[in-house]
Amino acid sequence: MHELARYLLENLYLDFQGDVSVEKVREFLREDDSKESRALLHKIIEEKGIDDLLLTLADCLRDSLATGVNANTIAEQLQTYSDS
């Protein structure tokens, strides 16, 4: 049973539902004047969209599934993405 659970966890597919678009991301970041927010917005503009962001974020969050994913985990990964 443990081997099956480990296998399923390792092969879990993470995706985002709802309206996740450049416009929606900009709407959320518009009120945030932090350095991290500006860096992320710059990265999204540089990458010409959010497809790479969402793929990278989902892939990185898979590593946190066993210990838990929360808003802080996602914020840390967003900052790491914008710094890359």
Image (cartoon, grey):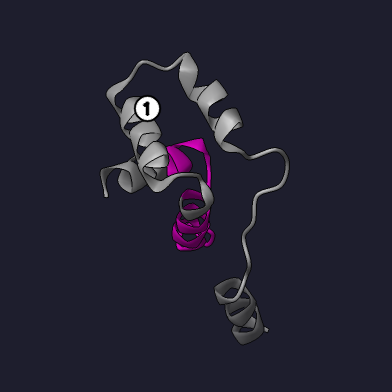
Q: Residue at x 47, y 43 (%)?
A: 74
- The quadrant holding residue 72 is top left
- Count of numbered circles in the view: 1
Q: Which residues are magenta?
A: 53-75
Q: Residue at x 31, y 32 (%)?
A: 39
Q: Is residue 5 left or right of residue 53?
A: right
Three-letter code, disc 1 = Ser
Q: Residue at x 63, y 40 (%)?
A: 20
- The location of residue 63, given as percent across then percent down, is 45, 63
Q: Residue at x 35, y 42 (%)?
A: 46
Q: Provide the residue designation for mark 1.
A: 37
Q: Does the magenta portion include 4?
A: no
- The location of residue 5, given as percent across then percent down, is 64, 77
- The quadrant holding residue 60 is bottom left
- Chief secondary structure of the magenta portion: helix
- The quadrant holding residue 43 is top left
Secondary structure at badge 1 equals helix
Against 26, is 22 above or below?
below
Q: Residue furthest right?
A: 18
Quarter occupied by the N terminus: bottom right
Q: Residues within 10 Å of mark 1 (few under 14, many from 20)?
A: some
Against 42, is 13 above or below?
below
Closer to us: 55 or 64 = 55
- The location of residue 28, given as percent across then percent down, is 54, 23
Q: Does the magenta portion include 58?
A: yes
